[in-house]
Image (tube, helix red, strand yellow):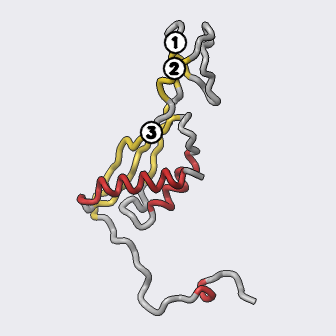
Amino acid sequence: MHELSIAVAVVEQVEEAVRDRGRAVASLTLRIGELAGVVPEALEFSFGLAAEGTALAGARLLIETVEARGRCEGCGREAATGMPPVLWCAGCGAPLTLLGGRELEIVRLTLAEGPAEEPRSAPPGPPVRDEEASHVPHR
């Protein structure tokens, strides 16, 4: 699932961009081409994990999907390639040059009104041993 590595990279880039502002991120918009090989649902799940404990924790992830389009090298016709992509012209049969559909871009972010929350630390008290924290009974 490479969506997790994409989510981590996006969170790191956005955190770096907003670090000096001291505010949390309310929403983040990504533009993803349908040929980028990204499963939006997997990216949304991964984003939630990657954002925990950061300025993006709780931020809403919005995804704009970009249709894959191509231009015919023979007749100049532009058309959607579909999924899976058809990379030749329906009109004349010449190959298509891709114009779009491979995007993976951070487009926009919206900052929250209040300051960013500090990452939560473990509650005070003695550390919990693994066997005490487990929900599976030990034999």
Report the side of 71 relative to 113 (left or right): right
- Please name the amino acid that badge 2 sits on: Thr
Query: Residue 118 occupies which quadrant of the picture?
Result: bottom left
SS class, disc 3: strand
Identify the residue at the far bottom of this view: 126
- Please name the amino acid that badge 1 sits on: Glu
Residue found 48% across the figure and 53% down from its top:
7
Q: On residue 73, which mark appears? A: 1
SS class, disc 2: strand
Determine the CA span between mark 1 and mark 3: 27 Å
| Marks 2 and 1 in Cβ contact (< 8 Å) | yes
Image x and y of residue 10, in percent: 42, 51
Q: On residue 97, which mark appears? A: 2
Mark whose residue sits in front, 2 or 3: 2
Identify the residue at the far left of this view: 20
Look at the image and tell me in which quarter the C terminus lies: bottom right
Residue denoted by label 3: 31
Residue found 47% across the figure and 60% down from its top:
50
Image x and y of residue 32, in percent: 48, 39
Q: Is residue 137 above or below residue 46?
A: below
The residue closer to the viewer here, 70 or 41, is: 70
Query: Residue 45 occupies which quadrant of the picture?
Result: bottom right
The residue closer to the viewer here, 8 or 128, is: 8
| Marks 1 and 3 in Cβ contact (< 8 Å) | no
Report the side of 130 relative to 9 (left or right): right
Image x and y of residue 99, in percent: 47, 24
